[in-house]
């Protein structure tokens, strides 16, 4: 288990990069330095001690897990991790993890612990990396707000869609059970893929990332189940959104409630205790059902939560339970 100093170092590296997102405008990121409150970082963004022992990128990339025997992803390779019980005799769900701005797939996986659940839940994990911008920071070209600040125009929709298709060709993937999990920039990217590749995506979970400010830019009409997870004190991607930049968590959810044809009134569920450093069951749960294609939409509102909460062990299983509960007809 990592001590508070190690957690602070890890969080600082991620917060510095993600902090740049909040300083962007229509002409790209500002050149002025980012001021980080070290006391806040020392708290790990609402952190408690948690098992982040794989947060070192090199360690995470040199594990002994089953990996594709041949390079996967062509010129932009991605990691593929199979469940230990993988067999061609049955089909398997696919879970793709999309990292935040400046992070890597390996670091994001260490933070959220997605691939660590693949044996328990029985899914194939795909962990890609975004392109590097002029400053060497990895990003996804998601919405018009985030995060192709250099206006490279890289087509990440085509790239990630091709990875999904390659996984289907190389492994026995259940095409009706393709799921995305994204954090921050990765959350924005998850929404874009749900908009443009909704015929292929079953459900998404977005932590601290929202959809297009102009909902008309969300093309396509296929229903996709959506889980939005957001801290009310997120100082990087604000819970309430930012004028003329990106919508808040609640408008994002509302747009997908309408898009999926759900019943307009959401039902409050039992509050969840996801972040140990916050007292009690800090996360309010609201779910909209009666949606097209057997989908649903949910909002997990982390009261007093920040941009990089340090979650307790039950967080990722709860996210996966939501995702795996959905299957395309």
Image (spheres, rainbow, N blue to C red):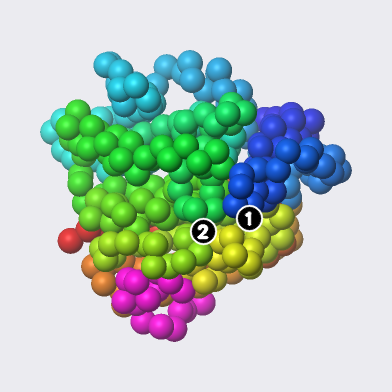
In space, the residues marked 1 and 2 are separated at their CA atoms by 8 Å
The one nearer the camera, 310 or 14, is 14
Q: x, y percentage for residue 168?
A: 20, 36
N-term-proximal mark, 1 vs 2: 2
The N terminus is located in which quarter? top right
Residue 51, position in %: x, y? 62, 34
Determine the residue positioned at 37% across, 76% down.
Answer: 258
Left or right? Give the position of 60 relative to 23.
Answer: left
Q: Position of residue 129 (x, y in %)?
A: 45, 31
Q: Which residue, given by chain and number where applicable, does mark 2 sit on? A: 210
Q: Is residue 73 visible?
A: yes
Q: Is residue 90 magenta?
A: no
* Residue at horizontal 47 percent and vertical 61 percent from the top: 212
Q: Are marks 1 and 2 in contact (CB under 8 Å)?
A: yes
Residue topped by disc 1: 237
Check disc 1 and report its element: helix, strand or loop. Answer: loop
Q: Quadrant of the C terminus?
A: bottom left
Residue 317: tell me if it is visible: no
Residue at screen point 20% across, 44% down: 174
- Residue 229's tag is none
Residue 264 sits inside the magenta stretch: yes
In this picture, is 258 found above or below 23?
below
Mark 2, secondary structure of its residue: loop
Query: Tag 2: Cα neighbours inside 10 Å, few (<14), some, or many (≥20)?
Result: many
Label 1: few (<14), some or many (≥20) within 10 Å? many
Residue 46 spot, x, y in % from top left: 73, 50
Q: In the rendered structure, which segment of residues is drawn in magenta?
A: 254-271
């Amino acid at each position: 288990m990592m001590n508070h100093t190690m957690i602070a170092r890890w969080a600082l590296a991620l917060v510095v990069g993600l902090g740049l997102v909040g300083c962007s405008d229509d002409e790209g990121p500002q050149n002025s330095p980012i001021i980080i409150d070290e006391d806040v970082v020392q708290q790990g963004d609402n952190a408690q001690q948690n098992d982040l022992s794989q947060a070192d990128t090199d360690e995470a990339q040199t594990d002994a897990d089953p990996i594709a025997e041949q390079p996967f992803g062509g010129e932009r390779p991605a990691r593929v991790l199979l469940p230990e019980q993988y067999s061609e005799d049955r089909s398997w769900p696919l879970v793709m993890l999309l990292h935040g701005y400046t992070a890597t797939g390996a670091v994001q996986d260490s933070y959220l612990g997605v691939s660590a659940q693949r044996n328990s839940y029985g899914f194939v994990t795909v962990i890609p990396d975004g392109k590097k911008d002029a400053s060497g920071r990895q990003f996804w070209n998601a919405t018009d707000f985030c995060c192709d600040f250099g206006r490279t125009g890289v087509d990440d929709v085509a790239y990630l869609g091709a990875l999904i298709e390659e996984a289907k060709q190389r492994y026995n993937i259940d095409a009706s059970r393709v799921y995305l999990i994204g954090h921050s920039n990765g959350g924005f990217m998850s929404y874009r893929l749900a908009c443009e590749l909704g015929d292929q995506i079953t459900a998404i979970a977005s932590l601290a990332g929202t959809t297009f400010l102009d909902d008309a830019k969300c093309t396509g009409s296929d229903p996709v189940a959506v889980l939005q997870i957001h801290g009310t004190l997120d100082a990087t991607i604000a819970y309430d959104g930012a004028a003329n930049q990106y919508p808040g968590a609640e408008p994002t959810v509302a747009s997908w409630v309408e898009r999926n044809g759900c019943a307009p009134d959401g039902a409050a569920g039992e509050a969840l205790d996801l972040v140990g450093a916050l007292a009690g069951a800090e996360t309010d749960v609201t779910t909209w059902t009666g949606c097209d294609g057997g989908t649903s939409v949910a909002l997990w509102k982390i009261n007093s939560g920040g941009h990089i909460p340090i979650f307790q062990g039950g967080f990722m299983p709860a996210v996966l339970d939501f995702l795996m509960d959905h299957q395309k007809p």
